[in-house]
Each structure stands twice: as structure tokens, then as C-alpha cells.
Image (spheres, rainbow, N blue to C red):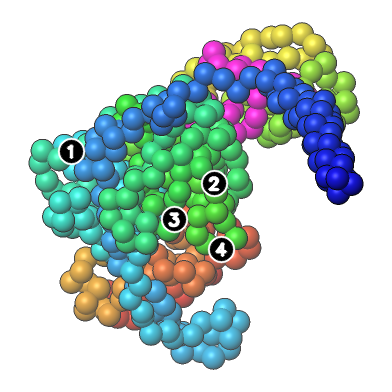
Amino acid sequence: MKNIKKYTLMLLVIVASAFFAVWIFSNYFQKSEVITIAEQRPVNFVNLPANSQQQLPDLTFAAENSVHAVVHIATQSVRGDGWSSGNPFFDEFFGLRRQEPQLATGYGSGVILSEDGVIVTNNHVIERAQKIKVILNDKQEYDARLIGADPSTDLALVKIEAENLPYLTYGDSDNLKLGEWVLAVGNPFNLTSTVTAGIVSARARNLGINPEEYSIESFIQTDAAVNPGNSGGALVNQQGNLVGINTAIASRTGSYAGYSFAVPVSIVKKVVEDLKEYGQVQRALLGVSIADVTASLAEERGLEKVEGVFVTAVIENGAANEAGIREGDVILNVAGEPVNSAAELQEKVSRFRPGEDIKIVIKRKNDKKQFTVTLRNKHGDTEIVRDNDTFLGARFEPVTNEDKNYLKIESGIKITELKNGKLKDAGLSNGFIITHVNKKPVYEVNDFRRETENARGGILVEGIYPNGELAYFVFGV
């Protein structure tokens, strides 16, 4: 009987303890969990459908519309082939050494712009190429000829003899919005007809990667994956229209690392039109040195707002100076469009040709003024530049393959007409073939022009006469 009472008491204690534990849990621990959930409810993550992919754009039309109009470009060029003068002291001074020519191959992409085979690509894809081959998406191959190139925008135009080709139409790069979906179409790592997608992450990006004196950089920045081989390929919008030419990537490894850059179609259109009509780009110059307006610059110069583009210098007898624009002015608007960076201003002006008038709105001492500026060319006048085959008083023509084989040269341009100028003063004569300038091979007049204009100091011209006699000339810039 005593044991029964003992066990009954223990049972009552256990039951009471259980009820007490449940009461503690329900009033404290369980209440804490409810409070936590209640605090999360006001954070409203809302209104996404069960299948969130329905909110993504359908890019299949754009991909199918563009992939057949983007081509694979393969190039061949000969590097090396330096000459010795036979004079060891002369060779030592100029560093001349005979180098055996080496065949170099390159690859890139291009975009068909018309059904008869006009193709735009990057200048660096075809630069110094002796042979350019175009491979279509259906594996057909064509030899291409160079129509013209513009190193300042890194664009070039080539042509193949074909008909009824698929081609892309121009879109509107001015209306691209940050966050808008775009496609990059090209041939990375020789993987033909590759399409990647991303968004526009920045506009009017100036990277400072183009060494040309009159370079224009106003890149569209995207996060679409682009790799070596994509150069010259298409950046297209959701409608399948061309909005840019893929040109560069930001990378420490040489491969895609998150950002890629394309020349906007607003620049592409002007360059293509000029190369087709004139053989070279008609660069219109405002005649000013400019800088972005920063907070520190605004404070230093007493500017009311951080806006526009600051004029740091005005070239004497330039277009801006003649119109009345002065150093210290802030350019706010070009041709009816606002500008807030040097890249934007250069891109707007690049759409015009020498001799055309544009409206420029500036702020001077906090007062706005409008000027009409007649743009000029690099020579300081308003004429269209047409002398693509003349330079320094000489007219040139390409060297024929027959002459190259006979003279055993791989590059060169022949002087066909010589007037007063630095070449005549230096002793060059009609018929002389310029093969190298400052030890760099010359394949066309633009090569000779570019190396000469970018040189600092003396110019060394190497070449050969039609009878096989080698000659060297030196003159000042």
C-alpha cells in the first residue's frame, strides 16, 4: 500500500511537470517564433509569378535575325621583312636588321550591312592584312577587298562579291536605356555563330585605349560575354537591329571578365557612309580642348553646377574660336542634345562633316549663350578631304603582285606623282616604292600617313626602286 502511494505521487509529479513544460513553451518559446514571422510579413517581396521566367524578354527572334548576318573573318599578313642598308653604322643607328618574313593569321567577326556584301568590322581585325577571307554562317567562303578603314574609331569596311545576303538594319543607339537587354553575336575563340545576352550597363564610356590623335571613344558598356574573336561582331537590341559593333573587353586575363564595349551605331553609320562615298572618314573638328566637369573643377572655376563639358583651350583660327566660344566656357548642348562628358560631345560632333553648321549652347559666367559653329577639317578649312591617295606632296598607288614577286617584297606603295613637299625635298622620286616607315611595313597610304603623323622626331623611309636598288631617306616631321 505504501508503494502504491509512492508511485502514484511520482506519477502526479511527472504529469504536473509535463503540463508545466507545455505551458512554459507555449507562452515563451512558441510566442517568440510567432513574433519573428510577424516581423517579416511587412517586408513585402510580392507579386512575382510562380514561373519568374515569364518576366524575361524573349530574345529568340533577335538571335535568329542576327546570327545569319554576322560573319567570321580570317586574315593573313606578313610580319617582319626588315631590310639592311649594307652600311653597319647606318644599320646600328636606325636598328635595321634583316628579318625573315613570317606569316601571321588573325580572326574576328563582321556584320553584313547590305545584300550585296558590304561588311563592317573593326579596324584592328583587318589592319595590315594582305588577305581577308569572309566565312558566312552557312560555311560559304569569299575573298574580301578593303573599301576603307578608320583607325580613330577602330572601324573598317570590306566587300565581298555576293548577292541576296542576309543583313542587319540599323537600330537607334541613342535610345538605349540602362538595363535594356542586348545580344552580342560573333565568333569567339573561332566558335562560329555564338550568341550571348546581357544588359546595357553604361553609355558614353571613354576607355582611353585608342592611341590615334583624333580618336573617338563613346562605347556602349554591357555585361554580355565577349571574347577574342568577337571583335567586329554585332550588338543587337531585342528587335534584332544593330545598335553597336563589339570592340573591346575589360580583362586582366585576355578573356571575358564581366564587361564588354561596343562602338555605338550612331558612329558606325557615319563612318560607313564616309568610307563608301569618300574612301576615308570626313572628320569634323570643333577646335577645342575639353574636360569633364567634376565637383573639384566646378569649385575651382566657380561653376554653379556640375554639368556640361569644360573648354580648357580654344585653338586659334579653329571653328569654335571663329564662332565666339572661349576658354572657360561650359558646353551644355550640341545640335539640340545635352552633353555631360567629353565622350558624349565628341560622339555628337563626329556625326557631322566639315563645312556643316551646328548649334552649340554654352554657359559663360552663369549666363547661357548659343553659337552657330561651322565645323572644319583637320587642315583647318571646311572642305571635304578627298586626297586619300596623296600625302606630303606625293600621289601613290598599290604595288601589284607582279612587282612584289619580282622585287621580293611583301609590302609597299608606289609614288606615281611627286609635287613640292617633304618627300621631294628628302630626295624621293617617281616610281620609288615605300616599303617601311620607321621600320614598320607600309601596305597602304593610310599606314604611311598614320605612322608619319604619330611620329615624334625624324622619319626614316625605307624602300626600293623598280630596278631593285634599295634606298633610305630621313626627314623631319
Residue 464 appears anywhere in the view: yes
The kind of residue on which mark 2 rests is Tyr
The kind of residue on which mark 3 rests is Asn
Q: Residues within 10 Å of mark 4 (few under 14, many from 20)?
A: few
- Quadrant for residue 365, please give it: top right
Q: Is 343 within the magenta?
A: yes
Q: Which residue is label 2 attached to? A: 259
Measure the alpha-carbon separation of dots 4 and 1.
35 Å
Q: Which residue is label 1 attached to? A: 166
Report the magenta residues as a range.
327-351
Q: Residues within 10 Å of mark 2 (few under 14, many from 20)?
A: some
The kind of residue on which mark 4 rests is Thr
Q: Which residue is label 4 attached to? A: 253
Camera-near label (4 vs 1) is 4
At mark 3, the secondary structure is loop
Measure the alpha-carbon separation of dots 3 and 4.
11 Å
Q: Which residue is label 3 attached to? A: 227
Q: Are marks 2 and 1 in contact (CB under 8 Å)?
A: no
Farthest-out residue, left: 163
Which residue lies at the image location 58% right of the left edge and 38% below the top edge?
205
Could you say where residue 67 lies in the image, as x and y percent from the top left?
A: 26, 43
